[in-house]
């Protein structure tokens, strides 16, 4: 079970670094007046997949009773559910397939917001 804890923590660190890089890359693309392309959307999908793997590890820890050690485990679970839902929600409701420069701005700031949310996780 210690391996799952180490993996969950490692994925947390990888997630905030990935979303910071993704957000900064998105800002560079937005300032250059580029639209959303397949490379950027693919990177967003990889980031979302990374969060899914981390969430599976979190569910394993929750089932095994390891989340009791956290000071507020219910808030940790709430953050975990939020990060899984946020980017697909933005893509399907706010963007609705918009791949213009406006969509690039929205995705860039959404990924920077995700960076902040994921970075907040260990402090819970």
Image (spheres, rainbow, N blue to C red):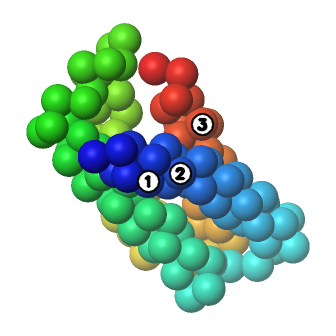
Which residue lies under the disc numbered 3?
A: 119
Q: Nearer the viewer, residue 6 or 73?
A: 6
- For the residues labelled 1 and 3, the Cα–Cα distance comes to 16 Å
Which residue lies under the disc numbered 1?
A: 7
Res. 89 image quadrant: bottom left
Chain-order first, disc 2 or disc 3 = 2
Up/down of 95 relative to 10, above or below:
below
Up/down of 14 relative to 98, above or below:
above
Residue drawn 59% across and 66% down?
103
The image shows residue 58 at horizontal and vertical percentages of 29, 44
The image shows residue 82 at horizontal and vertical percentages of 34, 40
Secondary structure category for the residue under label 3: helix
Q: Nearer the viewer, residue 37 or 78?
A: 78
- For the residues labelled 2 and 3, the Cα–Cα distance comes to 12 Å
- Is any atom of residue 96 visible in this view? yes
Q: Which of 33 and 89 is in front in this view?
A: 89
Residue with the most extreme top position: 71
* Disc nearest the viewer among 1 and 3: 1
Task: Describe residue 71's horizontal placement relative to residue 107 as left or right.
Answer: left
Residue drawn 68% across and 79% down?
35
- Is any atom of residue 84 visible in this view? no
Chain-order first, disc 1 or disc 3 = 1
Which residue lies under the disc numbered 2?
A: 10
Task: Describe residue 104's horizontal placement relative to residue 54 as left or right.
Answer: right
């Amino acid at each position: 079970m210690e391996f799952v804890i180490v993996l969950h923590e490692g994925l947390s660190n990888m997630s905030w670094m990935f979303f910071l890089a993704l957000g900064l890359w998105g800002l560079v693309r937005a300032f250059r007046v580029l639209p959303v392309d397949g490379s950027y959307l693919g990177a967003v999908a990889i980031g979302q997949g990374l969060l899914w793997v981390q969430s599976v590890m979190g569910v394993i820890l929750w089932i095994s009773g390891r989340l009791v050690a956290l000071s507020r485990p219910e808030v940790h679970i709430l953050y975990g559910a939020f990060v899984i839902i946020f980017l697909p929600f933005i893509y399907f409701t706010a963007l609705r397939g918009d791949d213009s420069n406006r969509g690039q701005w929205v995705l860039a700031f959404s990924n920077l917001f995700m960076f902040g949310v994921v970075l907040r996780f260990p402090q819970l």
